[in-house]
Amino acid sequence: MLDTPLVIKLAPDEVWWGGACEYGTSMPFGAAAFALDLSEDFGGNQAAPFLVSSQGRYVWSDAPFMFRFEDRSLKIWPTSPLVVEHAGLSVRSAYRHAAQRFFPASGTHPPLALFSAPQYNTWIEMGYEPTQDKVLAYARDILSHGFPPGTLIIDDNWQEDYGTWQFHSRRFPQPQALVDELHAMGFQVMLWICPFISPDSATFRKLHEMGYLVKDAEAQPAIRRWWNGASALLDGSNPAALAWLRDCLDVLRARYGIDGFKLDAGDPEYYRPDDLTYRPVTPAEQCRLWSSVGLSYPYNELRASWQMGGQPLVQRLRDKKHSWDDEGLNTLIPNGIALGLLGYPYICPDMVGGGLDEDLHSPQFHLHAELFVRFVQCSALFPMMQFSLAPWRVLDSAHLDLCRQSVQLHVRIFKDLAALVHHAASEGEPILRHMSYVFPGCGYDAINDQFMLGDQILAAPILTPGATSRWVSIPPGTWTGDDGSTVRGPQTIEVSTPLHRLPWFRRYVEA
């Protein structure tokens, strides 16, 4: 890294997005001081060596860099050559230029079934104790409570051990019967996996002998602490190691009909620059290689990614607290916007109500029904939505009905979502967009509590407790509200927001 940074003076009113989506709540950058070193910190979510400006400029590098906004300047300490371009006059023009050049659309997309109905994850509902009986009961409850079948993700501890990707014989005695029954109900089935290998297992001994594990600076298998303990790491730089993993996963698909996989972890923080690997790679590159495993499976989900823009990968926002603040509901929109502007269009918010284990499973946890409803409303207008905590178990009938209404809305707009998915696959544009992406120069840069779904749907979810109204910035054009009203923009209007209402507007387009 250079001692002297490249300095880019910001133009009047110019702001920027990019780097890592977890810091979307601090975006757009430019007005306040902010610093981030992408060689050390992804914030537990997706990242890219890319910054894009409201006035048509962008920065790209093939490697992580450190950057800092201060005193109306952008300072960058690169570790490889930087590309600094001016392409048009808006964030959209700059983004499209950069995407076509550095992270072009692949032409393919994840299955539309991931967008047409909710995903359901066992994590918060079952924690580390999923079983065959619990999963089947969960699936039956989904249907019996009026929720549509979707993709069911069986999370951590379905397996024999970390790295031993076989169904645990006691917890899942008849996996074929389980998958067959779930398929018969209309669900797709995905399984959780990670790059960690339990160090006291036969799998560890086998992979160590084959040279498939990351080694530390002393040439010993690297044992790294993570949220489930201490484990070895599969070496993604070794093509044979990734081929071994794919063989394990392909057996699950062929033997039981598993549809795909949730690839958790892979964060660069678990790797070190002095690790000994099959070929020299950075921690960020290990993250990219782990993400690449998902390309072999149309049904996939990732929480951490690096430099995988334009690829047909489902990217989920990291685990959120069951709260209204910048660790919970209020992160969804800004972080979702940032994720799209990093080149990842196929995005899913965290599980409805939050998915942070130590929060929802703590003895002090208290469920707030209003928050749960507002969380599902916000998620309903994202490209995807995901449940874990069963709303029929924790809500009364009135609040449960409001959740069903939001799910029904998501299902109703599937035609719009499908068109946007196809567009993302061909053109690489985000599905969920910042207001300024669609309406540049209209003074919307600082708006982080509204978003556009494509160019025609404006979403203005409720993000504060007890809110009975909110102000909505209506862009130029004629818009039809969810309540049937017609409003002409640009103007700012106050709308009534009883708990049953999710304010959203569709722009009228002349034939």
Image: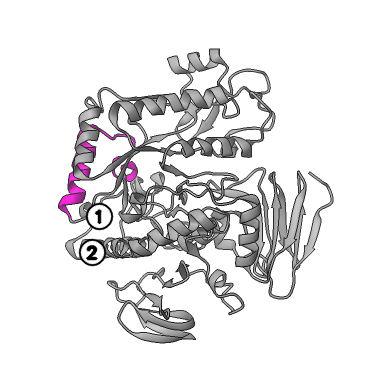
Q: Which residues are magenta?
A: 122-145
* Residue count near mark 1 (Cα–Cα under 10 Å), binned few <14, some 14–19, many ≥20: many
Q: Which kind of residue does numbered mark 2 sit on?
A: His
Residue 409 at x, y percent in the picture: 29, 65
Residue 141 appears in view: yes
Q: Is residue 159 above or below residue 262?
A: above
**Mark number displayed over residue 475:** none
Q: Nearer the viewer, residue 87 or 469?
A: 87
Taking 85 as reference, is 254 left or right? left
Q: Is residue 124 magenta?
A: yes
Q: Earlier in the sequence, mark 2 or mark 1?
A: 1
Taking 114 as reference, is 280 left or right? right
Q: Seen from this angle, which residue lies furthest left?
A: 144
Q: Are marks 2 and 1 in contact (CB under 8 Å)?
A: yes
Q: Which kind of residue does numbered mark 1 sit on?
A: Pro
* Residue count near mark 2 (Cα–Cα under 10 Å), binned few <14, some 14–19, many ≥20: some
Q: Give the residue number, with chain letter if any, for mark 1.
A: 391
Q: Quadrant of the C terminus?
A: bottom left
The quadrant holding residue 401 is bottom left
Q: Is residue 221 above or below residue 15?
A: above
The quadrant holding residue 167 is top left
Q: Quadrant of the N terminus?
A: top right
Residue 233 appears in view: no
Q: Nearer the viewer, residue 98 or 307?
A: 98
Residue 225 at x, y percent in the picture: 53, 31
Residue depicted at x 36% and y 81%: 480
**Mark number displayed over residue 399:** 2
In terms of secondary structure, where does tag 2 sit? helix
Q: Nearer the viewer, residue 349 or 151?
A: 151
Residue 41 at x, y percent in the picture: 62, 46
